[in-house]
Amino acid sequence: MSQYRYLPVTDEDRREMLDVIGVQSDEELFSDVPEKIRFKGELNLEPQLSEPELIRFLSRLAKKNVSTSDYPSFLGAGIYDHYIPSVVDSVISRGEFYTAYTPYQAEVSQGELQAIFEFQSLICELTGMEAANSSMYDGSTSLAEAALLSSGVTRNKKIVVSETVHPEYRQVLATYAHGRRLDVVTIPSKDGETDVQALQAAINDETACVIVQYPNFFGHVEPLKDIEEMTHNAKRAQLIVASNPLALGILTPPGDFNADIVVGDCQPLGISESFGGPHCGYFAVSKKLIRKVPGRLVGETVDDKGQRGYVLTLQAREQHIRREKATSNICSNQALNALASSVAMNAFGKKGIRELAEQNIQKAHYAAKKLSEEGVTVCDNHTFFNEFVVDCKRPVSEVNRALLDQGMIGGYDLAKSFSHCENKMLVAVTEMRSKAEIDQFAEALGGIIRG
């Protein structure tokens, strides 16, 4: 056996493979590669370590990281520190779910199919929509796929998106749109919300869809009623709303505003921050669009004995139907993370999700009040969920380093994404932050800004 425990190819394996293809050595195998372009030196790699040495080395590296288990976090911008019930890990760690993939064979996949069906049902309840798919990769791909769906249905090429939509979502949208030759028009923000006058001027009969975020990237709750009227006054335009699913525990759901498509990321419900991923995107639509939904849908039926069962009802990707009929090339769903969200939602229940949402609002508004008292300029009005913008009067990177020195993880530096937001920080306050932590943060940030 090879002396290296984790390398699958032994010396004997290498010799056998060379014998089968009829060469004597590695050098002979690569003899067709010109001598002058072959690499002759030693690769600049760390020396090999034994397993105990490797574990000690990686442990030392891990200890250099600071996580939300160590310091209270006020960083959001799409990924949040939320309470995850312990039952979530207990369920998703079970082998029958942990290793499950696409449930092609319904007769042996009833557990996985039922879990997906329940996820779809819960998303419909939260969003007020009529149908939801089995999940997408994340919120950004959900939004981009929604834009493609709208363009395909309306046969229009103009995508109108608000600047208040998550900047990374808009980047993914731009990538998708480039391949389809779609025209993406970005509407500027005004006082942290979509400039409705600019939006009104941009919408016309060539518009495929209008995309807004609710609450938006800056934390504000957009006036969906007004935006919906503007959108649907156009000839064929559809309204796409990207929503934080936890916020929908207390906000009027987009479906009640006649949204055509509602998308978002389920990370706030039962999914760990995990240094940025993986996530789980949701995708919900009105009934008229159900046959155009990317990915797949699970439906409920009965077997020949009248017993309840679950099946893959609609599959719109090119692997399942004629390529020219496919609506998307999305290749999988985030079944395990969708299950985590489902378990969390069931553990919380309707009252629990509403209570969590209320705590986010109350604690965020308390934090804004305390920061104001400490002399920090809060840039937002009172229509925000759990995020708001503050003016640090100096580079946010410097402020965050100072906060880290005091044992706190600061907010998001908006200058990274918006040129007009120099020295502005997006602060997130979830139900996980205690009054003492908020007070400490407000005092520390106020002191840093005052110098």
Image (tube, rainbow, N blue to C red):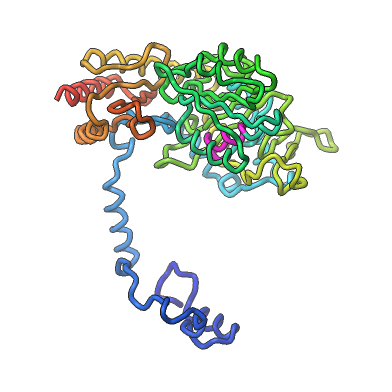
Task: Give the dominant element type of the magenta stretch: helix, strand or loop.
Answer: helix
| Magenta stretch encompasses residue 145 | yes
Quarter of the image holding residue 417?
A: top left
Horizontal placement of 420 versus 108: left or right?
Answer: left
If the image is split into quadrants, where does the C terminus sit? Answer: top left
Toward the left, the furthest residue is 451
Residue visible at 33% across and 35% down in the picture: 68
Residue 40 showing in the rendered view: yes
Horizontal placement of 277 versus 333: left or right?
Answer: left
Residue visible at 66% across and 40% down in the picture: 295
Q: Position of residue 349 (x, y in %)?
A: 54, 22
Q: Position of residue 140 (x, y in %)?
A: 52, 35
Front-most of residues 366 and 421: 421
The stretch of residues the image draws in magenta is 137-147
Horizontal placement of 290 versus 190: left or right?
Answer: right
Horizontal placement of 325 versus 304: left or right?
Answer: left
Quarter of the image holding residue 173?
A: top right
| Relative height, residue 389 to residue 267 (above, below) | above
| Magenta stretch encompasses residue 230 | no
Q: Position of residue 67 (x, y in %)?
A: 32, 39
Front-most of residues 60 and 45: 45
